[in-house]
Image (cartoon, grey):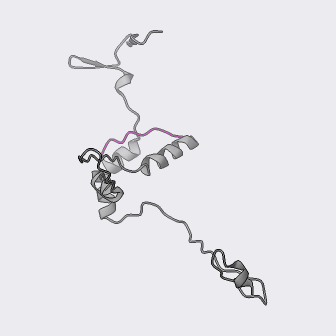
């Protein structure tokens, strides 16, 4: 089948004025969401682990960035901090999210690593290269 093949329905389902519409013009929707939010919300079912992976990657993908700097030929002046600050683009949704101080991530519970030592023994703290002195 070639790429220029065009599929046309034999009979249009709906005629509005001089325009004909078939099921290619219909998008999935949820009547409950339509009534609740008084707006059309395109809804499709994603029942795969890959969809969760895609959403996670999409939300946390970061921002688009580009930096351009004009300098004399042969001069080596690479300032990573200014390149990051000047090349950062913050979209409207990200700006709103950060201005309202919403969390970008969430921990369900905090895990704290506790210092543990054997009974009747003291923990030993040492610097690299001075292990023998710490044992004495």
Q: Position of residue 36 (x, y in %)?
A: 35, 50
Residue at horizontal 51%, vertical 40%? 46
Q: Report the front residue among 56 and 61.
A: 61
Q: Position of residue 99 (x, y in %)?
A: 29, 63
Give the x, y percent position of residue 24.
37, 23
Q: Nearer the viewer, residue 22 or 86?
A: 86
Give the dominant element type of the magenta stretch: helix, strand or loop.
loop
**Between 43 and 132, the one nearer to me in the picture:** 132
Quarter holding the C terminus is bottom right
Residue situated furthest bottom in the rendering:
120
Total labels: the figure holds 0
The reply to whether the magenta stretch includes residue 42 is: yes
Residue in the image at 42% along x and 13% along y: 3
Does residue 117 lie above or below 100 as drawn? Answer: below
Residue 101 sits in quarter:
bottom left
Question: Would you say 47 lies left or right of 73 here?
Answer: right
Q: Is residue 12 magenta?
A: no
Question: In the figure, 124 relative to 44: above or below?
Answer: below
What span is in magenta?
39-46
Q: Residue 134, relative to residue 102: is it above or below? A: below
Between 35 and 94, the one lying in front of the other is: 94
How far from the left and from the top, in percent, is residue 20? Answer: 28, 17
Q: As drawn, which residue projects farthest toward the left?
A: 17
Q: Seen in the image, is 104 located left or right of residue 84?
A: right
* Left or right placement of residue 23 versus residue 91 in this view: right
Residue depicted at x 49% and y 63%: 106
């Amino acid at each position: 089948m070639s790429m220029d093949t065009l599929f046309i329905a034999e009979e249009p389902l709906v005629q509005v004025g001089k325009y004909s519409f078939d099921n290619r013009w219909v998008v999935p929707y949820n009547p409950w969401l339509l009534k609740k939010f008084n707006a059309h919300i395109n809804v499709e079912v994603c029942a795969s682990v890959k969809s969760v992976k895609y959403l996670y990657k999409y939300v946390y993908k970061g921002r688009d960035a580009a930096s351009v700097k004009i300098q004399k030929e042969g001069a080596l002046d690479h300032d990573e901090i200014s390149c990051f600050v000047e090349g950062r683009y913050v979209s409207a949704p990200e700006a709103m999210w950060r201005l309202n101080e919403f969390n970008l991530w969430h921990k369900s519970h905090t895990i704290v690593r506790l210092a543990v030592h054997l009974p009747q023994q003291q923990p030993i703290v040492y610097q690299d290269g001075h292990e023998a002195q710490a044992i004495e």
